[in-house]
Image: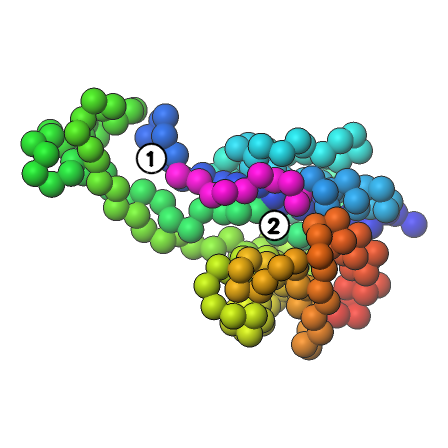
Amino acid sequence: MPSPYVLITCGPAYAPVDDVRRLTNFSTGEFGTLMAETFRDAGWRVVCCRGDNATFRPPGEGVELHDFGTNQGLEKLLARLAADPTTSTPDLLLHAAALSDFEVASVQPLSGEGSALPDPDARKLASLAPGWMLRLRRVAKLLPKLRALFPNTGILGWKYLLDGSRDDALAAGREQMEACGTVGCLLNGTAWGPGYGLLRPPADVVEFESKQEVAAYLSEHLKPPALREAS
């Protein structure tokens, strides 16, 4: 019987400002590394897509590692993995990557500074300019697109909230699960409080104190039979 197969996304994406500067999130990739190594040690086949700005060490031997930069880069990478005829379909996809919510729509000199408009063909904004104003636009979330790429995979999402209460975090997790067709949502941030909470349908919540506890639980309790029962 083949080993269960987990696909993990982790670490930060970035949105370029120019060819030198970028917008990104505070994400080290630590959670992804811990999950990848825990699943590997539990006998899973592990493929990890890791943001190339992650600062935590990459997973060790026995984990198939792929790098990505932007949201679009990760989406293309996942589409390629999904369409690869030489590999099986993941049993589980853990989408822990900290992707960009915004991208640069335009760059203008600060009002009243007397700066010339940026050269549209310039690869780097002038570093001696008095200042620049960035206009940002929201980008589409990747999680809702994953069900179409992986129709037979159990997908677990993340919800990191800083504002609101634990009830708000739970409501946001349920909304994400319903909208994206996921088998669960991991909750953390100050809205949730210390530690982590795993929300599973219909309304089960399991609490953890550490990333290591989360990884051990997921590798044990989200094996393919349990995923089939949840779907």
- Tell me how many marks there are: 2
Q: CA distance from mark 1 to mark 2?
A: 24 Å
Is 139 left or right of 213, judged from the image as shown? Answer: left
In this view of the protein, can residue 32 be seen by the observer? Answer: yes
Front residue (pair 196, 217): 196
Q: Earlier in the sequence, mark 1 or mark 2?
A: 1
The part of the image, by quadrant, that contains residue 92 is: bottom right
Name the residue at 39% across, 34% down: 22
Per the image, label 1 sits on a secondary structure element best described as loop
Name the residue at 57% across, 46% down: 97
Magenta segment includes 1: no
Percent from the top left, x then y, of residue 64?
Answer: 72, 34
- Residue extending farthest to the front is 194
Percent from the top left, x then y, of residue 108?
Answer: 18, 38
Percent from the top left, x then y, of residue 154?
Answer: 70, 60
Circle 2 is placed at which residue position? 96
Name the residue at 15% across, 38% down: 110
Q: Quadrant of the C terminus?
A: bottom right
Percent from the top left, x then y, of residue 209?
Answer: 71, 57
Front residue (pair 149, 142): 142
**Residue 33 position (above or below residue 123):** below
The magenta stretch spans which residues?
A: 23-32
Per the image, label 2 sits on a secondary structure element best described as loop
Magenta segment includes 26: yes
- Report the amino acid beneath label 2: Ala
- Report the amino acid beneath label 1: Val
Circle 1 is placed at which residue position? 17
**Residue 175 position (above or below residue 185):** below
> Is the residue marked by circle 2 packed among few (<14), some (14-19), or many (20+) residues within 10 Å?
many
Name the residue at 79% across, 57% down: 217
